[in-house]
Structures are given as C-alpha cells and as structure tokens.
Image: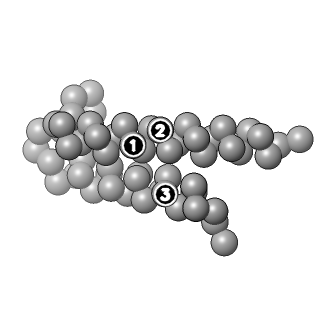
Amino acid sequence: MPDDLYQRYMAAHRANQEHAAACFTCTGTARCPAGQRLYDRFAVLQDAYLAAQKKRRP
C-alpha cells in the first residue's frame, strides 16, 4: 500500500490537473490564484516525495 505522502502527492497532482482542465484563466505559464495555490501544493509535495525516495536508496 502506498504511503501517506505518496497519496497526498498524487491527490495534489489530480487536483491541479482537474483545475487546469476546467479553468479558462490558467495556461501552461500563468495561473489564476486558485490554480497557483494548487500548483504550489503539488510542487511542495512532489519535492518532499522525491526527497524521501532519495533517502530510501542505498
């Protein structure tokens, strides 16, 4: 079973993707305030998940 960090990371990714698909303001380089918050949350969780993966490697 995936760990909690991975689940939160994937949920943030889904939320970011769903928002980007539905928002007429967000583009690949510019985001509305709500889109920016979702993207920032995704980026923080992605960085944390990748850092945890690096620690697990021998």
Q: Position of residue 5 (x, y in %)?
A: 57, 55
Question: Which picture quadrant has residue 34?
Answer: top left
The local secondary structure at tag 1 comes to helix
Determine contact: label 2, label 1, CB under 8 Å: yes
Count of all numbered marks drawn on residues in the image? 3
Q: Position of residue 20 (x, y in %)?
A: 24, 47
- Left or right, residue 49 beside residue 57: left
At x 40%, y 53%, the residue is 12
Amino acid carrying mark 3 in the image:
Arg
Outermost residue on the top side: it is 29
Amino acid carrying mark 2 in the image:
Val
Give the labeled residue for mark 3. 8
At x 79%, y 46%, the residue is 56
Task: Work out how far the residue at label 2 is from the one at label 1, CA to CA, in angstroms.
Answer: 5 Å
The local secondary structure at tag 3 comes to helix
Outermost residue on the left side: it is 24
Amino acid carrying mark 1 in the image:
Arg
Determine contact: label 3, label 2, CB under 8 Å: no
* Label disc, if present, on residue 44 of the rendered structure: 2
Task: Work out how far the residue at label 1 is from the one at label 3, CA to CA, in angstroms.
Answer: 10 Å
Up-down relation of residue 29 to residue 34 (above or below): above
Badge 3 crowding class, 10 Å Cα cut-off, few under 14, some 14 to 19, many 20 or more, is some
Badge 2 crowding class, 10 Å Cα cut-off, few under 14, some 14 to 19, many 20 or more, is few
